[in-house]
Image (cartoon, rainbow, N blue to C red):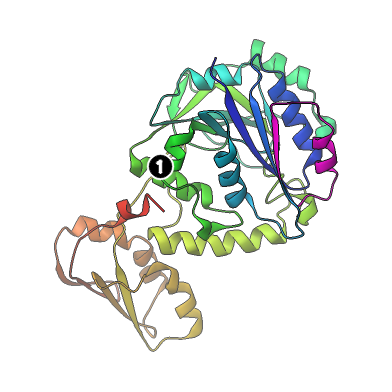
Amino acid sequence: MEKITFVIPSRNNLEFLQLAYKSIRNLNTKHEILVLNDASTDGTEEWINGQNDEDLIVHHNPGPERIGIVGMFDKGIEMARTDIIMAYHADMVAGPNLDEHILKHLKKGTVVSATRVEPPLHPDGPEKMLVDFGIEVEDFDMDKFNNWVLNEYKPKHGVNVTEGIFAPWCMYKEDFLAIGGHDELFAPQSKEDSDIFNRFVLKGYKVLQTWEGLVYHFTSRGSRFNKHAGGAAGKNSDEWLKTTTTNMKKFIKKWGTPVQHDAFLKPIISPVYNKSIVILNTNPQLDESLEPWFNNGSDIEVEIDGKTFTQEDFQIIQKLNDIIKDSGAVGEFELGNLKIKINSLEEYQNDLIHL
């Protein structure tokens, strides 16, 4: 079996990291584990240094400031000594034969995700399994989870593969490097995954999810629910709320829409246009709400009057890229209280693939 490098950023997540490490070492092949220790103060460095494992590689950020998973994932993938890498999170437990089920679908130009089994901290969805094997490490019984995977589990939809992508995802290192890695625009983290997933799809990579290869995911314990950042199981940290709000605006600015995907998390990518807006009788609140939706381009020109602008008009702006594509022609028209002038229908989303 080909070897995989499991690339795992971790910040003050030692108890979860130890469980992730143990589960990967329980697989039948001894894969490379590459831990990116991001300014941890919980004994992570000391624990790693105490392991006698030639296939455990570490990169330490001494801190005190964290780098975040954007920079850490890319550093780890760059350091990987195998041809195949897996973007893995410290709060994930590998199920039996995870590697075999991933690799049998993997080839050049393909990204393969495992299926997540999660406790009920987020709503259920078509792309995952909601089964509670514990919210905290001390509640988790690995033997019970492994037995369930091997003897009780059945794929949710009666098929072994669907199209979609979410962590953990696995691909050839050269395919990842071909698009330039994660966009530092989204550092330290949040929406960096949705951005790179869009770019994978635009590059032409297939995105597949295996329903045979499972991980138990304690759910966002390194980000939104990280106790060292003020969060807890089911409780968002202030740090995460700030970065996700900021980065959603950056995502909209770059892609022209919020994150879009189908029920199985396959990205939906609207056309990207160069758009500008003129706001008459504006105010600071209106300026702030509309700023992410335009990029000062001249292909599409929009004019509004702040005195007559409504919530319905804002909903039009949110869907404007698809409306423009459907219009199919240059010219001028009015929609709601918006005056829209289309000078060019040139699309720019393919320019966003490579950094």
The x and y percentages for residue 101 are: 53, 18
Q: Is residue 7 left or right of residue 209?
A: right
Depicted 223 relative to depicted 340: above or below? above
Q: Any magenta on residue 51?
A: yes
Q: What residue occupies the far top of the structure in this picture?
A: 151
Give the residue at x 85% y 40%.
Answer: 46
Taking the spot 46% from the left edge, 52% from the top edge, the residue there is 259
Q: What residue range appears in magenta?
A: 39-59
> Residue at (35%, 67%) from the top-left corner?
317
Task: Residue type at mark 1: give it.
Answer: Ala
Rendered view: 27 above or below 49: above
| Number of numbered discs | 1
| 109 part of magenta stretch | no
Q: Position of residue 248 (x, y in %)?
A: 51, 60
Q: Position of residue 70 (x, y in %)?
A: 58, 51
- Residue 278, image x, y percentages: 32, 81
Q: Confirm whether residue 294 shows in the render.
A: yes
Q: Residues within 10 Å of mark 1 (few under 14, many from 20)?
A: few
Is 148 located above or below residue 291 in the figure? above
Q: Is 240 left or right of 74, judged from the image as shown?
A: right
Q: Secondary structure at mark 1?
A: helix
| Residue for badge 1 | 178
Q: Is residue 135 visible?
A: no
**With 199 as the anchor, is 167 left or right in this view?**
right
